Image (tube, grey):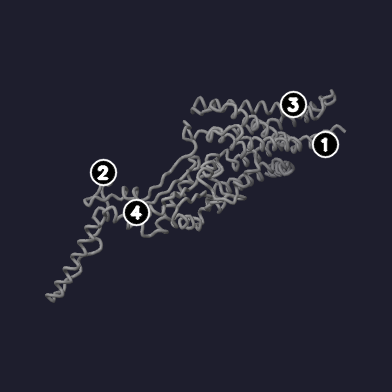
Amino acid sequence: MRKILTLVRKDFRIFLADPVAIGLGFIVPLVMILVFGLVFGGSSDGLSEFTVLAVNQDQGPAGKRLLASLDALEEIKIVEKLKNDSLNLDSTAARRRVETGKSSVAIIVPRNFSAGLKSGEVRLTLLEDPHEPITSGVVVGLLQRQVFTTFPGLMPMSMMNQGFGVDSLLQKNFNQDLRRAIERNFNAKFPDTLSLSSMFPEKMLLGSDPDTSKKADSSGFNMEQAFSKLFKLKREQVVGQNIVNPGIAQSVAGPAVMFMLFAVGAIAASLLREMQFGTAQRLMVNRVTSGELLFSKYLWSILLGGSQLIFMMLYGWLIFNLDVFSHAFNLLVVIVCTAAAMSALGLFIASISRTEEQAAGFQVVIILAMSAIGGAMIPSMFMPASIRAVAVVTPVHWAMKGFLDVFWRQLTLQEILPECGILLGMAALLVTISVVLFRKRLATELG
């Protein structure tokens, strides 16, 4: 038994002497638990507030009152005027912002909104991006609630206009007058047997069978029809109408970006392996500069990663009918910029790692964390606001935005240039840092 315990102590000493093993066993899981905990519900700010564009064209006071009541809610923030803009938004500008993904939803209050309320109708238009259904769903629910809260007389007036309860109300008033006349003239006391429930048909109070629930009751009133006549909300999808398979864009682009990161991570292993076995040193003795060595690895990684992305996009087209040919050139531009940024990340991982084991540990943490918060694993709309704010510093976020702008929004080359520019800027920064670190390292190792 003593020998066994001695061997166990020996293994613990070896393990504790290896910081990479400790990191992979304890530190990496802690980091991933933190990241996924924040993404999938560890943050309380979650879906606490949505920014909603609003265009008030109403010629009466009701439109302003409705938007003010909506803005007072904690769930949404009403924006009628953009920053550094002295004029309020118009419907054209609001539509364009939703089309380009700068906003998720916009409320248009028409010119006849106040007039419509007087006739028992709520007339509104909602411009929405179906790629973010949660936002539009929340806004619709809040709109319905605030309309009836801000204008409490709307529902009863609409119901009376549609004939509900009129006959019952007249009958009740007649019966009450008749009862009072009998009590006054004949000195008789009658119990008040006419309750308020008599105004409502029994089907309204007790419900009805599913096969008859959609039919009007004996009074000719149908709640679903009444509500549709009252709340006339026009929901207009301003983007993605012609997409054959809308949900597949995220499903293909996300895994493609994430697994391309693991593929280009091979650049770190390749460089470190060549340095460990002296291949890099022999190449430099043969007049290959450190810059040429790094650039060759970088170019190889771009070609590998780009080829992998093209292959996965074609697979999405073949299996899921993903439209990769309508905007093939724009898609190719985003693929090249994505491959450049992700390959630069692989080069950076190699520059800060001393061994292949260290590179593997850094690769797991960096790639999974960036994929989680950058939108490759799950759409960004499901993430807390704090996580979305951090995600903009990752190349995964901009790569996903570029792919979705091509597949979903079908933007032009000029419109996707900002994402491509940011990806190339990140690539240039990471490559510069990597070159500086590698030159110092090679100079030290070669004496």
Residue highlighted by disc 1:
440
Q: Nearer the viewer, mark 3 or mark 1?
A: 3
Q: Are marks 3 and 2 in contact (CB under 8 Å)?
A: no
In this view, the mark in front (3 or 4): 4
Q: Earlier in the sequence, mark 3 or mark 1?
A: 3
Q: Position of residue 187 (x, y in %)?
A: 13, 76
Label 4: which secondary element: loop
Q: Quadrant of the C terminus?
A: top right
Q: Secondary structure at mark 3?
A: helix
Residue type, mark 4 in image = Ser
What residue sits right under mark 4 in the picture?
119
Q: Amino acid at mark 1?
A: Lys
Using the numbered discs, state the Cα–Cα distance from disc 3 to disc 1 in whole angstroms: 18 Å
Position above or below: 165 against 347: below
- At label 1, counting other C-alpha atoms closer than 10 Å, the crowd grade (few under 14, some 14-19, many 20 or more) is few
Labelled pair 3, 1 in contact (Cβ < 8 Å): no
Q: Which residue is mark 3?
A: 296
Vertical arrangement, residue 445 with respect to residue 172, above or below = above
Q: Amino acid at mark 2?
A: Asp
Q: Position of residue 259 (x, y in %)?
A: 60, 33
**How far is disc 4 from disc 1 in space, using C-alphas?**
78 Å
The residue to which callout 2 is attached is 211
Q: Earlier in the sequence, mark 2 or mark 4?
A: 4
Q: Would residue 3 be visible to someone looking at this image? A: no
Q: Residue at x 82, y 33 (%)?
A: 442
Q: Residues within 10 Å of mark 2 (few under 14, many from 20)?
A: few
Quarter of the picture holding the N terminus? top right
Q: Amino acid at mark 3?
A: Ser
Give the residue displayed 41% in from the left and 52% down from the top: 113
Report if residue 233 is visible in the image: yes
Instruction: Answer left or right for 207 relative to 174.
Output: right
